[in-house]
Amino acid sequence: MTPKTYITTGENIPTPTAPISNAVVAGNYCHVSGQLAVDKNGVFVGGTTLEQAQLAFNNIFAILKEAGFSREDIVFIDLAFIDLKDISIINQFYDSLFETGRKPARTVYQAAALPFDGRIKVMAIAIK
C-alpha cells in the first residue's frame, strides 16, 4: 500500500474550517480539498467572484508547495460556482494561471450553495 501524507497546516496555507486535510499526498498524486476565499486563519474573506477565485487559487498553490508540488503538476481542476454567469470572468483569470497548451483538465458546475455563502470553490489534483 502507498503511504499517504496528510497536509493540514503549514506556513502559508489556510487552517481547515472543517474536519479535513487541505491535501492528501499518495505516491505521485496530490489531491487538494476544495478551497474557498479564506485567509491563513480559515476566516472567509469574501469579495467578488474574481477576488474569491484569486484567493482560492492562491490557497491551492500554497498547499501544493507545502506538499512538494507546483502549479505545473496540476492535471485536473474542479470549479463550483454559485452563478455560472461568472464563468467568462473566471475563464480570463484561469487562462492567465497556466501556460498555453498546458492547461489542466477541468469541470465546471453550478452549486446550489457553498460554505460561508462563497461564490466559488476550487479543487485540484496534481501528479508529479
Image: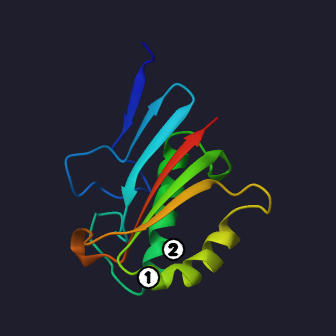
The furthest residue to the top: 1
Q: Label 2 belongs to which residue?
A: 54
Say which mark, if any, is on residue 34: none
**Quarter of the figure that contains the C terminus:** top right
The local secondary structure at tag 2 comes to helix
Q: Residue at x 42, y 19 (%)?
A: 3
Q: Is residue 81 above or below residue 42?
A: below
In the image, is residue 34 above or below residue 97? above
- For the rendered model, the colour scheme is rainbow
* Residue at the image point whose x is 57% and y is 43% from the top: 126
Query: Residue 43 lies in what quarter of the image?
Result: bottom left
Q: Quadrant of residue 16?
A: bottom left
Local crowd at mark 1 within 10 Å, few (<14), some, or many (≥20)?
Answer: many
CA gap between label 1 and label 2 equals 9 Å
Q: Nearer the viewer, residue 65 or 11?
A: 65
> The disc labelled 2 sits on which kind of residue?
Gln
Position above or below: 5 against 99: above
Residue 96 position, x and y percent, is 69, 72
Residue 73, given in percent of the width and then of the height, sits at 64, 45
Q: Position of residue 121 (x, y in %)?
A: 39, 66
